[in-house]
């Protein structure tokens, strides 16, 4: 190799690994959700061209494209994958710890079949709490990350009709979610979620097959804290009445929720399925989340850099488009008319929005219309 070319050569440990550490290794490490680890030259070398293609098409990493310089480095390395002279162990992302004041676990393992579709599974986990507790941190910990696409833990009180012949109510809030690369929610001092006395957790699991039978026994770790200044409550802004026509390239669907008391918006977690094309969330006139290239694998919790105050009577609006055309490589059937449903070949439009209200307020205040 000429001296000039050698000086310009991109190597794995000097140039590529720092990018992977910043943007990829939260999922692409042994035991995590991604299908291949990329923490060493030996692991990454067979996937050099796949890495190049993923970053140039913006299909990876979730939540935002790499910079132009980062893409250029990965493209150059893929053309000539060189290890370099300074091998080192990857610095893996530090995962937050949750003190397990209470651990709730599925009573028995669930068997995921080798190939067939699995309906959403719901497991009822009694808390046994004699008094209400404030939850400072939560971790949903899959027993088998290969098959858990995502998980949601709902709070269910004794008077709730959820999975008792009725629907979700205001009380049945989302306590926490598990998404690939994310499993721990830690709230800052002064904020917490409420777990009422006698409540149960409903653990909803979306499983995906891996071509062989697998088992999973997911658990939830809860860390309790003192009475906070603010209660964090997760509301769902959803639209369930739509019919995406066959071959539609960008079919629009919207959802809107008008708050009935002032709130501070903290974070947004979007949820769509395989036909999801784009999603934007507005709080009042402010865009708080914009995903022009939505992907089913990108259902991450997006924290706002600074909480946004929304006044009574203002709205949270979700604007989405769905791609039911043949150009969508993930489309299960472009000839189908698609409505709301839990399975991936059906569709959903939901934005889970974390808001802060005074700790003493019941969440009904957000929904209840004021009378004058």
Image: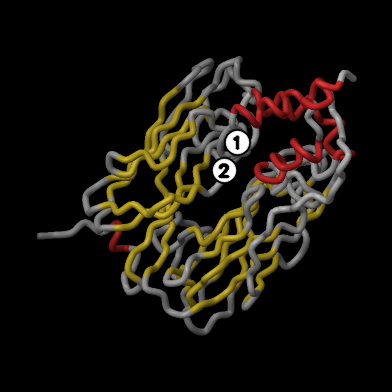
The percent position of residue 10, horizontal first and vertical second, equals 78, 29
Q: How many labels does the image show?
A: 2
Position of the C terminus, as image quadrant, is bottom left
Location of residue 106 with respect to 92 vertically, above or below? below
The percent position of residue 363, horizontal first and vertical second, equals 35, 64
Position of the N terminus, as image quadrant, is top right
Secondary structure type for disc 2 = loop
- Which mark, by number, is residue 299? 2
The percent position of residue 308, horizontal first and vertical second, equals 34, 52
Q: Which of 152 and 39 is in front in this view?
A: 39
Instruction: Report the Cα–Cα distance between label 1 and label 2.
Output: 7 Å
Secondary structure type for disc 1 = loop
The percent position of residue 134, horizontal first and vertical second, equals 48, 75
Q: Which residue is drawn at 41% across and 26% down?
A: 252
Task: Please give the residue where the numbered disc 1 appears in the rendered image.
Answer: 296
Say whether residue 52 is left or right of residue 293: right
Say whether residue 188 is left or right of residue 333: left
Q: Nearer the viewer, residue 282 or 203?
A: 282
In which quadrant of the rendered view does residue 101 lie? bottom right
Say whether residue 327 is left or right of residue 113: left
Location of residue 9 with respect to 118 vertically, above or below? above
Q: Which of 155 and 158 is in front in this view?
A: 155
Circle 2 crowding by C-alpha within 10 Å: few under 14, some 14–19, many from 20: many
Q: Residue at x 34, y 57 (%)?
A: 264
- Which mark, by number, is residue 369? none
Q: Nearer the viewer, residue 108 or 293?
A: 293
Q: Pointer 1 and pointer 2: residues touching (CB < 8 Å)?
A: yes
Q: Residue at x 75, y 23 (%)?
A: 76
Circle 1 crowding by C-alpha within 10 Å: few under 14, some 14–19, many from 20: some
Q: Which residue extends farthest bottom?
A: 130
């Amino acid at each position: 190799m000429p001296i000039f070319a050698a000086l310009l050569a991109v190597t794995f440990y000097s140039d590529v690994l720092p990018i992977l550490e910043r943007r990829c290794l939260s999922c692409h490490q042994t035991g995590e959700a991604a299908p291949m680890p990329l923490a060493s030259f030996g692991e990454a070398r067979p996937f050099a061209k796949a890495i190049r293609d993923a970053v140039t098409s913006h299909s990876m990493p979730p939540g935002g494209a790499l910079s132009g310089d980062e893409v250029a480095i990965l493209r150059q390395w893929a053309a000539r994958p060189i290890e370099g002279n300074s091998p080192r162990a990857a610095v893996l992302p530090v995962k937050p710890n949750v003190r397990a004041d209470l651990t709730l676990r599925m009573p028995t393992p669930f068997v995921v079949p080798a190939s067939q579709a699995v309906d959403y599974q719901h497991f009822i986990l009694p808390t046994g709490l004699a008094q209400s507790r404030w939850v400072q941190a939560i971790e949903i910990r899959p027993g088998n990350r290969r098959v858990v696409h995502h998980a949601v833990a709902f709070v269910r009180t004794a008077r709730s009709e959820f999975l008792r012949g009725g629907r979700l109510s205001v009380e049945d809030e989302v306590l926490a979610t598990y998404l690939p690369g994310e499993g721990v929610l830690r709230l800052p001092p002064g904020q917490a979620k409420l777990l009422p006395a006698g409540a149960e957790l409903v653990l909803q699991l979306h499983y995906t097959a891996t071509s062989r039978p697998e088992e999973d026994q997911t658990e939830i770790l809860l860390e309790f804290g003192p009475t906070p200044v603010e209660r964090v409550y997760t509301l769902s802004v959803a639209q369930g009445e739509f019919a995406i026509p066959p071959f539609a390239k960008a079919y629009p669907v919207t959802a809107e929720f008008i708050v009935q008391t002032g709130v501070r918006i903290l974070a947004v977690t979007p949820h769509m399925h395989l036909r999801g094309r784009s999603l934007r969330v507005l709080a009042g006139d402010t865009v708080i989340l914009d995903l022009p290239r939505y992907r089913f694998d990108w259902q991450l919790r997006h924290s706002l850099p600074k909480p946004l105050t929304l006044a009574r009577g203002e709205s949270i609006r979700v604007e989405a488009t769905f791609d039911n055309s043949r150009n969508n490589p993930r489309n299960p059937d472009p000839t189908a008319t698609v409505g709301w449903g839990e399975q991936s070949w059906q569709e959903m439009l939901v934005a889970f929005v974390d808001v802060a209200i005074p700790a003493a307020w019941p969440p009904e205040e957000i929904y209840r219309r004021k009378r004058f």
